[in-house]
Amino acid sequence: MSKYINFIETKGHYGSEVGLPISEIPDCLFDYQKHVTDIAARFGRFACFLDTGLGKTIIELTLAQHFAEKTNKPTLILTPLAVAFQFEQESEKFNLCEVEHTKDGSHKRNVVTCNYERIHKLIPDDFGCVILDESSILKNFDGLFKGRITEFLKRVKYRYLFTATPAPNDFVELGTNSEALGFLGYMDMLSMFFTNKEKTSDPSRIGSPWYLKPHAEDEFFSWVNSWSISAKRPSDMGFSDDKFILPELLEINHELAFDSEVKQKLTFKDIRKIQKDSVPVRVEKAVSLASGHGSTVFWCHRNDESQLIKDSIDCEELKGSMSIDKKEEIIKAFSIGEVKRLVTKPKITGFGLNWQHCCHATYFPTYSYEQYYQSIRRFWRFGQNLPVHVDRIYTTAEHPIIQSLESKSIKAEKLYIKLNEKMNSKYVAKADSYDQSISMPSFF
């Protein structure tokens, strides 16, 4: 074996089965969901990188109830804003367990959900297992808050992370995951597998000064797959995709001409100025495109964009300055169809929410591929029955942003393939090992 594998194995940083095997898995789970649940329960500390709509919620609830019974302590599920009610709906629908959503830290049931923002009201020693739903959202929090969550996890024996495939231009996010699960620390991972000496002008690498060492690539992905599983579709794990065919995704670019006195070779500062100056033009286009749709989400990044849309069309606006309770109220109203048009930001509602009832969105692109991907996957996910229309609105000066997003999309696919290649030799099951007669759940 290579020196990398030998080192991390001797240091105890390779994943191993230290969990509590599950003997009975509810029949309401699909075959591949049973497969993931079985593997995760045996490992005890594990990351599940499952794409949107594959049913992470039902897997999390099954694990939560299992570990609550085995440890005689409640299981805590930490969620993004307004996602907790989806756990309650899912659990009630499939009669899995009683779920309690706490806002003040008090709890009485076996499975407790809480928003990340309220973690300071909870005591780690009260729980036998902690599950982070949409764990990629940790990047949106500052270092102090992220550290608080990691320290919380360290005091709980059984830990799980659930999210879609990690950001393609940010392999080091996997270091944060590893550290949270109790394996290699973030800095140890960097020194083992990465270098910061490479220089590049590739726009897809903006924001990440660390690059995977070419000669360490196989060892790196073998290590990641020792404590995680990755899948975009059931067939990645040896099961049928028949019930998981996504409708068409129509990404339509609207490049707007915009006069500006900015020099030809644009810097980030130049682009930010153009974005600020072009707000009225871009908002006008977004509003006109939304007028023909019954339900729409306007994805913004700037407060002036959001405010102008609110002033231009009948809609509800989510603001960062709102209380958590107010945000949850608006998000829930949109999720159940009481609100038809919503203005929001990816950092507020880009994770975890199931919005298959909506099939149109407008988006003002930025260099963040993950924000774009997660935002669009609120609609374009298994359970969506209609083609999804995404109108991407930007000025000519912002064309490099679109190029960057497309580059990162290719890179994301390569990352997924690498993770999946390693998984195929370890976690792929024989499909006939599980009952495949389960009907398609309508709410994922």
Image: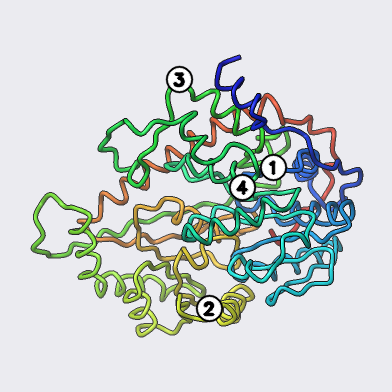
Q: Which amino acid is tagged 3? A: His
Earlier residue among tags 2 and 3:
3
Amino acid at circle 4 = Ala
For the residue pair 240 and 182, the one nearer the viewer reads as 182
Residue 242 placement, left or right of 269: right
Q: Mark 2 near mark 4, Cβ–Cβ under 8 Å?
A: no
Mark 3 / mark 4, whichever is N-terminal? 4
Q: Which residue corresponds to the image point at 58% horizontal and 45% vertical from the top-left?
A: 177
Identify the secondary structure beneath mark 1.
strand
- List x then y, in percent, for residue 154: 67, 50
Task: Please state which of the two labelled residues, at mark 3 or mark 4, is closer to the viewer.
Answer: 4
Q: Earlier in the sequence, mark 3 or mark 1?
A: 1
Residue ID for mark 1: 46
Three-letter amino acid code of the residue under disc 1: Phe
* Location of residue 155 with respect to 91 vertically, above or below: above
Q: Is residue 186 above or below residue 272?
A: above
